[in-house]
Amino acid sequence: MADAIDELKDVVVATLETRGVLSKIRAQLRHEVFLALEEEDSKQRPEDDNEHGHKASVAARRAALSQSEEGVLMTQLVKEFMDFYELDYSLSTFCAEAKVPRHSNRVELANKIGVRVEIDERKEDQVPLLMHVLRGAGRAGVQQHQHPQQQQQQRFEMNAKQMQDEQQQQQQQQQQQQQHQQQQQQH
């Protein structure tokens, strides 16, 4: 009888593991533990000076995330990544810890970081915006450290230059055609 129960436990655990249920339960448990610890930590209690200094430093860095444009963009990119892969419990913990709002707009975020995405893009054709950033950083080389507005301006200038080059090429072709026609008329 005990063997049957152990065997049933093993089958249930394996099935839940295969379906991803156990990993979700573990993530939810970690999330709840984090929230409980965070709640307890937020209560005033005596701390030694060294630990208090470290916690103040970490708290200041976290606060800076929400006070700078780059910090907000970084946290929103991480959030969009977690949203994309439906890492709900990790996302819940991240949003609570980093003070990231749960709602966001993928297209608006893409525009802010200078990434072009199609609005009607199907989910299965999409990649996380962070992937676009990494791909762009690989192509951009030194430009990867530029502010998104600078990158957007640079892309605009490159597109304008490309259009100007195409117009010049068309004008040259038209001039060549006209010269060719004039030569044919002279003969």
Image (cartoon, grey):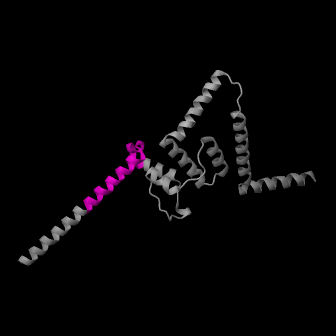
Q: Report whether residue 135 is seen.
A: no
Q: Which residue lies furthest to the front in this view?
A: 44
Tell me if residue 146 is in the magenta stretch.
yes
Examine the rendered structure and indicate whether residue 173 appears above or below residue 92. Answer: below
Front-most of residues 45 and 74: 45
Q: Which residue lies furthest to the top in this view?
A: 49
The residue depicted at 33 percent of the width and 57 percent of the height is: 159
Quarter of the picture containing the N terminus is bottom right
Residue 139 spot, x, y in % from top left: 40, 49
Quarter of the picture containing the C terminus is bottom left
The residue depicted at 53 percent of the width and 37 percent of the height is: 64
61 relative to 180 in the view: left or right: right
The residue depicted at 10 percent of the width and 77 percent of the height is: 184
70 relative to 8 in the view: left or right: left
Q: Report whether residue 131 is seen.
A: yes
Image quadrant where residue 175 sits: bottom left
Residue 78 spot, x, y in % from top left: 56, 47
The residue depicted at 59 percent of the width and 32 percent of the height is: 58
Residue 84 spot, x, y in % from top left: 58, 55
Examine the rendered structure and indicate whether residue 75 appears above or below residue 8. Answer: above
Q: How many labels does the image show?
A: 0
Examine the rendered structure and indicate whether residue 173 appears above or below residue 43. Answer: below
Q: Which residue lies furthest to the right in this view?
A: 1
Q: What stretch is highlighted in magenta?
A: 138-166
Examine the rendered structure and indicate whether residue 1 appears above or below residue 74. Answer: below
Most common SS among magenta residues: helix
Tell me if residue 45 is in the magenta stretch.
no
Front-most of residues 4 and 156: 156
Residue 152 spot, x, y in % from top left: 39, 51
